[in-house]
Image (spheres, helix red, strand yellow):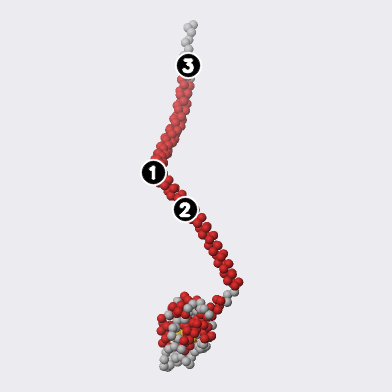
Amino acid sequence: MEHTYPETVLLESRSARGGLVHRVEVLDKVKALAFSTGRAQATTRDVANYFEVPLKTVEKLAERHREELESNGMTVLRGSDLPEFETDKMSVADFHRPSYPQLRRSLTVFDRRAVLNVAMLLRDSTVARRVRAYLLDAEGSSRAAVSPAGVEEVRRSTYELRQTVRTLAAGYGSLDRRVGTLEAAGAELGAVLQELGPLIGRLSTRVERMDHRLAETERRTERTEELVCAMSQRLAGMGEEMRGMRRELREVMRAVQAGPTPPQPHDAS
């Protein structure tokens, strides 16, 4: 069967490995994976035993690809997490027994995804090559098992997507033309405003002068109103004085008219 990827692509491409790292079922198809921890996590020695390679080989590979392996399930246990993985095959210290001769500072464990990741990285392992071949065959089979209806659905979706892209492109072209028109209009408006700039400046100066004149006129009007008010008050006082003078004049005239009667001459008898 033709493989989805050539084996060398899995060895060289992290993205290709990332696309297949979920197919953990192929591990047991090739060989049973034993966990000495009693959990679904293998130690570095478990991984070395599975792939039939020296322990140092797996340790060096884990160090060289630490970031990728940790993203796929490799974990380094330290401190209080270690006693939970104590087994008769591991020299992990029991922290309740201080007289234990050795104290492991850390322990690297791999889940199934991380083990499969190691299989796609190990070059000199017959078991790893078998896992890669089985993995590629399984992936190719799953791709070939896609139903014609599913293929037709994908084609229809692709066609609809292309039509949508064309519609958006046409709309973008129209929008681009409108934006171009607006930019041209903006440029023309800028030129007109530039020409009107001196005129607007002169009008602004004249308006400012008129404002000054209006302010001066207002001040003069206020002073005039003050003068008129004072004159009104003065005229009111003069009217009162004139009325008093008239009363006095009438009294004088009445006094003059009512003066003493001259004596009458007596007849001689």
Q: Earlier in the sequence, mark 1 or mark 3?
A: 1
Numbered-mark total = 3
Residue, x 39% and y 43% (percent of image)? 198
| Vertical order, 163 against 47 (above or below) | above
Give the image quarter of residue 232. top left
Q: Amino acid at mark 3?
A: Thr
Residue, x 51% and y 78% (percent of image)? 3
Q: Earlier in the sequence, mark 3 or mark 2?
A: 2
For the residue carrying disc 1, how many other residues have a C-alpha within 10 Å: few (<14), some (14-19), or many (20+)? few
Residue 265, position as x, y percentages in the image: 47, 10
Residue at the disc numbered 1: 198
Residue 215, position as x, y percentages in the image: 41, 40
Q: Amino acid at mark 1?
A: Pro
- Which mark is on residue 45? none
Q: Amino acid at mark 2?
A: Gly
Using the image as rendered, state which of residue 56 and residue 262 is in the foreground.
56
Taking the view exactly as shown, the residue that stands out farthest to the front is 1
Give me the C-alpha separation between circle 3 and circle 2. Answer: 118 Å
Q: Nearer the viewer, mark 3 or mark 2?
A: 2
**Apparent side of residue 172 relative to residue 212 in the rendered image (left or right):** right
Residue 266, position as x, y percentages in the image: 48, 10
Residue, x 56% and y 76% (percent of image)? 144
| Vertical order, 252 against 90 (above or below) | above
Residue at the disc numbered 2: 180
Taking the view exactly as shown, the residue that stands out farthest to the top is 269
Residue at the disc numbered 3: 261
Give me the C-alpha separation between circle 2 and circle 1. Answer: 29 Å
Mark yes or no: residue 110 visible.
Answer: no
